[in-house]
Amino acid sequence: MKTKWTHASLAALMISLALTPCAIAQVQTQTSTTSHAATVETTVQRGEVVYAEGNNLIVKMEDGTLKDFPNVPESARIMVDGKEIGVHDVKVGMHLERTITTTSVPKTITTVQTVNGTVWQVHPPLTVVLKLDDNSVQQFNIPKDQQFNIDGKMVDAWGLKKGMKISATKVVEVPEVHVTTEHQVTGTMPPPPVPPPDQPILVAMVPHPAALPAQPTETAQASPAQLPKTGSPLPLLALLGLLSITASLGVRVLRLWN
């Protein structure tokens, strides 16, 4: 804060005035504002919506962190493909881009206060009593080491005398920065869902004729691996037995004839 004192500088006195409504009317105050060159800072944030329910969103940012946006206002708008949508139109999978523009404008607030009066009483180095233009009387506190310009001569509180006319001006300059922030959100709709791939089916493969194995001709006869059994030794044994019995009977007959 910068303070300037001019002429019979009583301005510092006004810092600690015990002002009554009458005295306030005698203090003239003017305020002006001077703007300086603005600075603009732009930040872009990107992410993908991973949760959207009501007015609450959760976005996965580019760095992998999850950022919660609770209670998004109904008035919020997102520009998607040239069309404005609200928070309830946001879908999971949508990519959002938020541009934050911060504009800072340095300003100087200048306040000028003036008071006119005649020294009525002085109690150096602490206070002085002035008779103001409306004939009211008001006491002012004197700041430490305050100097006064009386007819071109600088004096302290001890140099003030009754009857001296004083016009005091206090100029106070207060710097401040006026900051405005603008948010603009754009987005792109998530890609349409990809249909599931077709299920695999069986495909008959026909090999080239040259790759087929040789097939037997119709005239070829398959030889049996083993001949089947067609007879049994029992009939032969029976025949031999019969012949033996017959021979025995023949021998006996011959013996009887002899």
Image (cartoon, rainbow, N blue to C red):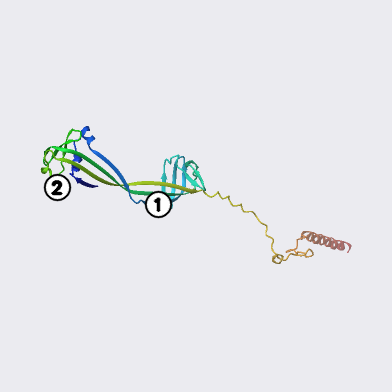
Give neighbour class at mark 1: few <14, some 14-19, many 20+ (Cα, 10 Å). few
Measuring from the top left, give residue 181's x and y in whole percent: 38, 46
User: Which mark's residue is nearer the viewer, 2 or 1?
Assistant: 2
The image quarter containing residue 134 is top left
Check residue 13 in the rendering and tell me which mark sits there, or answer none: none
The image quarter containing residue 70 is top left
Q: Residue at x 38, y 52 (%)?
A: 41
Along the horizontal axis of the image, is 124 left or right of 242? left
Q: Name the N-terminal-most of marks 2 and 1.
A: 1
Task: Tell which of 226 and 92 is nearer to you.
Answer: 92
The image quarter containing residue 242 is bottom right
Check residue 154 in the rendering and tell me which mark sits there, or answer none: 2
Task: Tell which of 210 and 120 is nearer to you.
Answer: 120
Q: Which residue is drawn at 49% across and 46% down?
A: 79
Task: Tell which of 167 and 65 is nearer to you.
Answer: 167
Q: In this view, does 107 lie above or below 139?
A: below
Between the C-alphas of marks 2 and 1, the distance is 53 Å
Q: In the rendered structure, are the residues bearing label 2 and label 1 in contact, judged by CB atoms less than 8 Å apart? A: no
Task: Tell which of 174 and 23 is nearer to you.
Answer: 23
Q: Which amino acid does label 1 sit on?
A: Thr
Q: Is residue 100 above or below residue 26?
A: below
Q: In this view, does 165 lie above or below 39?
A: above
The C terminus appears in which quarter of the rendering? bottom right
Measuring from the top left, give residue 40's x and y in whole percent: 38, 51
The single residue placed furthest to the right in the displayed view is 257
Give neighbour class at mark 2: few <14, some 14-19, many 20+ (Cα, 10 Å). some
Measuring from the top left, give residue 128's x and y in whole percent: 14, 38
The residue that disc 1 covers is 42
Q: What element carries label 1?
A: strand
Q: What element carries label 2?
A: strand
Q: What residue type is labelled 2?
A: Met
